[in-house]
Amino acid sequence: MSVTVGLKGRAETLVSDQNTAQAACSGALPVFGTPFMCALMEEAAWKSIAPHLEEGQSTVGTKLDITHDSATPVGMKVWAESEVTAVDGKRLVLKVAAYDEKGLIGQGTHERFIITNERFLAKAAKKLEA
């Protein structure tokens, strides 16, 4: 299996009280929170890539450069789309965009790296050592 340019993904959710700017502590208003839009973009990306990886591999997000251009109220459906635009060894670059039922609400680029799960977790666990 391998990840190729052009691979696309999608993730969606409904805006609720649990994914507002208020809930994320990223703002005071009851609208879809930017942190949740970022997470939706990452979800579209990693879920589209995962089936194309070898056993024991995953991807981790390392960079997200986005704009959040339009507010979405509670009760409206939102979705994110991703597309792999570059594959440079283990480094993957994706174009990401988010939409609500009225149109584009955010867009940008996202970078992920292919990792080996055990090695990655072992490295993280070393931070707990004295």
Image (cartoon, rainbow, N blue to C red):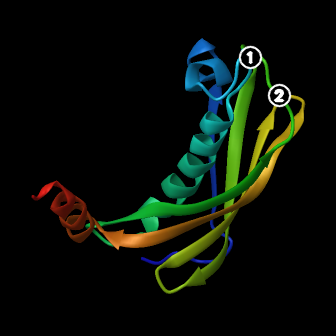
Mark 1 or 2: in front is 1
x and y percentages locating residue 103 in the rendered image: 89, 37
Could you tell me which quadrant the C terminus lies in? bottom left
> Which residue is at the front of the view, 127 or 107?
127
Q: Position of residue 116 (x, y in %)?
A: 29, 71
Residue at mark 1: 29
**Image point 72% across, 25% down: which residue?**
77
Q: Amino acid at mark 1?
A: Leu
Camera sees residue 92 = yes
Asked if the residue under mark 2 is in contact with the one under mark 1, i.e. CB atoms within 8 Å, the reply is yes
Residue reaching furthest left?
130
Please report the residue visible at 18 percent of the width from the left and 58 percent of the height from the top. 125
Q: Which residue is mark 2?
A: 71
In the rendered image, the residue lying farthest to the right is 102
Determine which of the numbered discs, if any, sits on residue 19 in the image.
none
In this orientation, does residue 15 appear?
no
**Kind of residue indicated by mark 2:** Ala
Q: CA distance from mark 1 to mark 2?
A: 10 Å
Mark 2, secondary structure of its residue? loop
**Mark 1 secondary-structure assignment:** loop
- N-terminal of the two: label 1 or label 2? 1
* Left or right of 114 on screen, residue 97: right
